[in-house]
């Protein structure tokens, strides 16, 4: 979970890349989208450190809502977060990554086994 959070925070750096050559500017991201990536990244890191399923679910819902907002922006042309389909793909990747980790089988985790008795 913390790796996805760190990746999300690093993705916010794309807001500074429009002046770089096209082969480096992978993601079109505006400051509003970068702020969302930062907030969701921090929440994912906290969820991973605390090993909280509730915080993980909240982070997954946050990524999903951001992806839906980005999709609505692409469909209507109303700039909510800025960015384009590349931003949408990062939000969808965050949603899927956090959701997969949330559903992962944790029965072999010694920390969780010791807490459950």
Image (cartoon, rainbow, N blue to C red):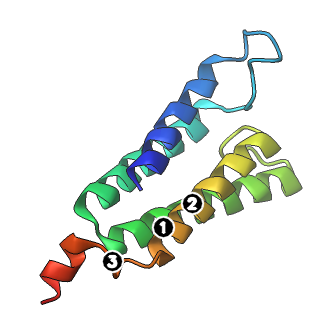
The CA distance from mark 1 to mark 2 is: 6 Å
Circle 3 residue: 108
Q: Residue at x 58, y 31 (%)?
A: 31
| Label 1 with label 2: CB-CB less than 8 Å | yes
Return the residue nearer the eye: 15 or 95. Answer: 95
Task: Residue 42: give x, y in percent of width and height.
Answer: 37, 46
Q: Residue at x 55, y 69 (%)?
A: 100
Task: Residue 91: give x, y in percent of width and height.
Answer: 64, 52
Drawn side of residue 22 relative to residue 12, left or right:
right
The CA distance from mark 1 to mark 3 is: 14 Å
- The answer to which of marks 1 and 3 sits earlier in the sequence is 1
Please state, as top left, top right, bottom left or bottom right, where the C terminus lies in the image: bottom left
Task: Residue 34: give x, y in percent of width and height.
Answer: 55, 36
How crowded is the residue under tag 1: few (<14 C-alpha within 10 Å), some, or many (20+)?
Answer: some
Drawn side of residue 100 relative to residue 52, left or right:
right
Q: Can you name the residue that lies furthest to the bottom here? A: 117
Q: Residue at x 28, y 66 (%)?
A: 51
* Mark 1 or 3, closer to the camera: 3
Drawn side of residue 107 relative to residue 67, left or right:
left
Circle 2 residue: 97
Please state, as top left, top right, bottom left or bottom right, where the N terminus lies in the image: bottom left
Circle 1 residue: 101
Query: Can residue 85 be seen in this snapshot?
Result: yes
Displayed quadrant of residue 66: bottom right
Query: Can residue 61 be seen in this snapshot?
Result: no
* Mark 2 or 3, closer to the camera: 3
Residue 8 higher or lower than 20, as above or below: below
Label 2 element class: helix
Task: Residue 59: give x, y in percent of width and height.
Answer: 45, 62
The CA distance from mark 2 to mark 3 is: 20 Å
Q: Residue at x 65, y 44 (%)?
A: 81
Label 3 element class: loop
């Amino acid at each position: 979970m913390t790796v996805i959070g760190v990746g999300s925070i690093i993705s916010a750096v794309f807001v500074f890349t429009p002046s770089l050559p096209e082969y480096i500017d992978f993601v079109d991201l505006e400051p509003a989208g970068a702020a969302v990536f930062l907030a969701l990244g921090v929440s994912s890191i906290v969820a991973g450190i605390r090993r909280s399923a509730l915080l993980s679910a909240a982070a997954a819902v946050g990524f999903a809502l951001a992806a839906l907002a980005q999709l609505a922006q692409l469909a209507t042309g109303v700039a909510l977060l800025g960015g384009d389909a590349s931003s949408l793909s990062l939000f969808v990747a965050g949603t899927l990554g956090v959701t997969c980790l949330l559903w992962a089988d944790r029965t072999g985790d010694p920390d969780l086994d010791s807490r459950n008795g």
